[in-house]
Amino acid sequence: MIDLERLLRVPYVDPYLGFDISPDGAKAAFSWNQSGGWEIYELLLDGSGDPQPVSKGPGGKFAPKYSPDGRRLAYAVDLDGSESFHLFVHEFASGRAVDLAADISYALQPNFAWSPDGREIAFLADKESHFDAYILPVASPLPEGSTDKSILPARRILDVGSPGWNVKWSPAGAWLAVIVEGAGQDFYAYLVSPDGKTNQGITEAGKLVDLHNPAWSPDGKRLAFSSNAHGRRNVGIYEPATAQLTWLSDKEEERYSPAWSPDQKKLVFVASRGAATWLEVWAQGEEPLHKLVESGQHYLPTFTPDGGSVVFIFDNPRHPCDLWKWSLQDGQLDQLSDSMPVELKAASFVMPVEVTYPGMDGVSVPALLYRPPHATPQKPAVILIHGGPDWHFSFLWYPFIAHLTSRGWTVLAPNYRGSTGYGRDWQLANRFDLGGVDTDDVAAGAQYMVRAGLAHSKHIALTGRSHGGYLTMCCLTRYPELWAAGSAVVPFLNWFTAHANARADLQHWDIENLGDPVENHDLWHERSPFFFLDRVRAPVQLICGANDPRCPACESVQARDKLQTLGKEVELVLYHDEGHGFLKIENVINAEIRRLAFLARALEEKCVASNSGG
């Protein structure tokens, strides 16, 4: 058995908010929890030396970005788990870091961009109730003292009434691409002049087009992006001067996270089919180059400034997230950071297989099945539900699953309707049906495990985070007979109270995907498991963070209170210094060990009882 605490202490590079390569191509900056907390590190891209820390102090640090001259490094800091990010700038010469948002009471997104001359930073803030785009002058050298209040008079350049998500400044300086939430789960892009006087939406056939992962060409004349507009994520290219939009040739796989080569002749992006991903380099009229480390997840490929290599992040169930480099000259792969401790490198980690099973309505549901060699139906089984819901399980480093399979437990990770990775129709299949067909798909996974001889009907528990925690509670109330236990991590249970206590940008998503709470009152009530807790038969665990802006802790507290009133078995674990994604390693470890203990207590007792004929 592989010790869970040891697995949870394995560090990894943050794969979502990105890394950056220095302008001279010598270094990469990235967020890493090697010390237990999230700090910014630098490493040499030639592979010499060990990563060196750049940041220090409280909070989790993410999304590093070098200034154009390489003398400064900006990064986002979440001080308390509330996702109210602050914006810091580190000056290499003096070693000082300044919080540009020290005295503000509103939140910033962790996505921001330097101006080409390095004199300003564009960012997104919910100063006016949703995330608008602003531009802030940044003094150089940084002023003496601990704060710079120049962020307060920052000028707003875009407010379209929808929450902003990302911003990218064109290398020529003429435009900023600002990405905002659109209808449903689409995102739209506006090209905005730095003075804020001109903006234009990127459209196709007269309609705003879904647009993610914007990447400017080095000359600023083209914007590459990924889009789900035509059924599957594909890479498109937009030319602002002519408003022309073109697409890469259509294929069955999905494509996303594009980046330009320095000579502007090539694009690198991630391609995927189901849970499998690889890297692809595309050039007009040439056969594409393909590369993968092994079955796993590849993230954020980026050309080095000389164009000779691609740097990216990779993980899978055998490897935590690390930085890698792919040489385009000889095809060699080099691992740049090494998070896996020596004593775990020879450990036997279970790789999942992709399976499908029939949903309640007969539609095939994709899933990952983790089946250890010594698993039997007499041992525990767990359905692990992903959050999002617009996300999906792929071949990821997931310590909790690794530990469960090392105990001989079988784990099923469904990519229920509402998941990404399987086309636009699948992703939107639970729109205005949240807690409906997605719940059915998860519950059908338990029925599949029993039919296939993977699990005993009384030995299946379920657990999930965020929307996965919500679906855990939906399953416990809609299909109570299927479960031995349920652990919901940072869940919500009552659409009405969760919506009322959420930020404006999160409320926007709720309305776009479940409708207006007044007009659709009955649907909101029906899809809130809080109102049906009397149906619960299995023990319930609720784990939450007091600073959570997405699934407020009051959701778990009020559910605990109601379950206790109903005489149900319930355990509440509340972390007063955490938010939605826990930042402190000791809290992460404590929460996961408590989740494991809860599931083990419920499942192993039932296994003993049924195996002895009780």
Image: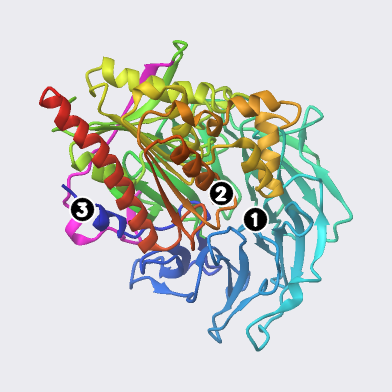
Q: State the residue at coordinates (62%, 36%).
A: 495
* Amino acid type at mark 2: Cys
* Amino acid type at mark 3: Asp
* One can see residue 140 in this view: yes
* Amino acid type at mark 1: Pro
Residue 411 or 266: which is nearer the viewer? Answer: 411
Query: Which residue corresponds to mark 2?
Result: 554
Residue 194 lies left or right of residue 105; in this view the side is right
Residue 92 lies left or right of residue 373; in this view the side is right
**In the rendering, at what x and y percent does residue 111 appear?**
62, 57
Query: Which residue corresponds to mark 1?
Result: 218
**In the rendering, at what x and y percent does residue 267 appear?**
55, 44
Q: Which mark is residue 3?
A: 3
Is 340 colored magenta in this rendering?
yes
Quadrant for residue 180, please give it: top right
Farthest-out residue, top: 362
Residue 614 lies left or right of residue 214; in this view the side is left
Q: Which is in the foreground here, disc 2 or disc 3?
A: 2
Residue 267 lies left or right of residue 138; in this view the side is left
Above/below status of 288 relative to 359:
below
Q: Earlier in the sequence, mark 3 or mark 1?
A: 3
Q: Residues within 10 Å of mark 2 (few under 14, many from 20)?
A: some
Is 347 colored magenta in this rendering?
yes
Farthest-out residue, left: 612
Label 3: which secondary element: loop
**In the rendering, at what x and y percent does residue 249 appear?**
58, 28
Q: Earlier in the sequence, mark 2 or mark 3?
A: 3
Q: Which is in the foreground here, disc 3 or disc 1?
A: 3
Q: State the residue at coordinates (54%, 81%).
A: 92
Q: Residues within 10 Å of mark 1 (few under 14, many from 20)?
A: some
Distance CA(mark 2)–CA(mark 3): 32 Å
